[in-house]
Amino acid sequence: MNRITVGVNPVREALRAQRPLDKVLIAKGAAGPRIQEIVELCRAQSIPIRFEPRDALDRAANAAAHQGVIAFGAVHSYVELREIAQDARLLVVLDGVEDPHNLGAILRTAHAAGANAVVIPERRAAPLTETVAKAAAGALAYLPVAKIANVTQALEYLKERGFWIYGLDERGDVLYDQADYNTPTAFVLGGEGKGLHQAVRKHCDVLVRIPMAGPVSSLNVSVSAGIVLFEWRRRRGSQEPARDVHYTS
């Protein structure tokens, strides 16, 4: 089974990461520095390029906004939790995030903050679709995603390996900017509208919350992820390697 990657940034980052691709379609008339970079990367990696009418790309993209570029390749493979737990300093565990745009945004933020991987359950979770890859803006090419059968069992597995588990919950006793973040760290984020499941909450070492100034009691999960992950990174300071940041829409 093949999957497609749509959009200029996701395709370019897939090429930069040297993900195996079968071919790349570019809309006739598409031009600019980023398109030229994609062409050069394809030629350097001997990946076939085809220039097709834009309506052909519209059909191939299945209504997704492709920006004139589509890549065809193997389905994104998941990693095992044991593969990423041994040397990780920061993991992001998702408990029921079902919106693909939120998942993509969390992947993008987690990568930017220096997370080693994101962990998602088999059930009650958005799969790694083209929509997710588009929202992740290329991060999926670099950030491993582990799929697990059970969140609470995964948290116990991580605890046995020295991880401190911090659950983000609006009822948490500790403000996110006052918690002592011990490493290795695993942040657990709940799903849209539901938050953390009760069994998952009980398996967290610390429940932290983000204070709200207005009457709305919670933030979008991807926004909350950005707040706590970059607080963790701020605490690490020079201990974590910096990455170049590219601001995109």
Image (cartoon, rainbow, N blue to C red):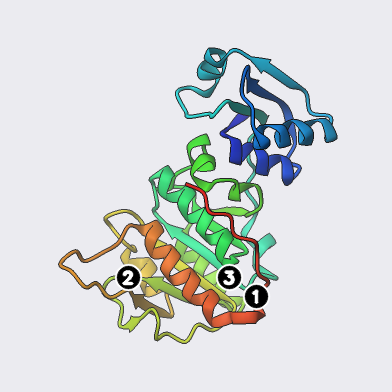
Q: Position of residue 61 (x, y in %)?
A: 52, 23
Rendered position, 168 above or below 57: below
Left or right: residue 25 compared with residue 159:
right
Q: Which residue is mark 1?
A: 240
Given residues 122 and 99, the one toward you in this image is: 99
Q: Which residue is mark 3?
A: 90
Near mark 3 (Cα within 10 A), the count class, few <14, some 14-19 or many ≥20, is: many
Whether pointer 3 and pointer 1 mark residues with C-beta atoms closer than 8 Å, the reply is no
| Residue 129 image label | none
Picture quadrant of residue 191:
bottom left
Q: Position of residue 149 (x, y in %)?
A: 51, 53
Residue at 82% over, 30% down: 43
SS category of the residue bearing label 2 = loop
Q: Position of residue 138 (x, y in %)?
A: 60, 46
Residue at 19% over, 64% down: 216
Residue at 58% over, 65% down: 115
SS category of the residue bearing label 1 = loop
Whether pointer 1 and pointer 2 mark residues with C-beta atoms closer than 8 Å, the reply is no
